[in-house]
Image (spheres, rainbow, N blue to C red):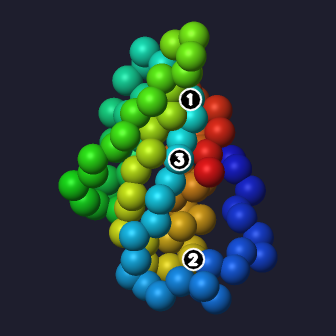
């Protein structure tokens, strides 16, 4: 289990609900985008148009997507759920 993000300033700078961009880096060729969307839909339902960019050697890919978030805790929940996917390596 990933530790929750602490002392974030999301609530000071954002007005909810609002779009929030997530960038996820992980292993390529493992249906990474499908794994991310399967975990994301129950906690932040929406029609997503993820942008996928492969690494130069093709071993990794980045998935950028915009989700509508409703609170700082909602952002933390998304980070925790997505970063716990085995094939995810980093998340911004």
Q: Residues within 10 Å of mark 3 (few under 14, many from 20)?
A: some
Outermost residue, right direction? 7
Look at 61% across and 45% down and name the residue there.
91
Q: Position of residue 10 (x, y in %)?
A: 62, 78
The x and y percentages for residue 84 are 59, 42
Say few, some or many: other residues with alpha carbon within 10 Å of mark 1 (under 14 / 14 to 19 / 20 or more). many
Closer to the eye: label 2 or 3: 3
Asked if residue 18 shows in the view, the reply is yes
Q: Secondary structure at mark 1?
A: strand
For the point 57% across and 11% down, the residue is 57
Residue, disc 2: 72
User: Which residue in the protein does label 3 denote?
Assistant: 23
> In this rendering, which labeled residue sits more in front, label 3 or label 1?
3
* Position in image of residue 33 (x %, y %): 38, 34
1 or 44, nearer to the observer: 44
Describe the element under mark 2 as helix, strand or loop: helix
Q: Which residue: 47% across, 59% down?
A: 21
Which residue does the numbered mark 1 point to in the structure image? 26
Q: Is residue 28 above or below residue 3?
A: above
Q: How many marks?
A: 3
Ranked by sequence position, the earlier of labels 2 and 3 is 3
């Amino acid at each position: 289990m990933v530790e929750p993000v602490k002392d974030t300033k999301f609530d000071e700078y954002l007005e909810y609900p609002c779009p929030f961009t997530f960038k996820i880096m992980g292993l390529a060729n493992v249906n990474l985008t499908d794994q991310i969307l399967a975990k994301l839909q129950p906690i932040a339902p929406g029609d997503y148009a993820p942008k996928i960019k492969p690494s130069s050697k093709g071993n990794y890919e980045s998935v950028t997507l915009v989700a509508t978030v409703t609170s700082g805790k909602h952002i933390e929940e998304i980070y925790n759920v997505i970063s716990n996917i085995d094939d995810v390596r980093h998340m911004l």
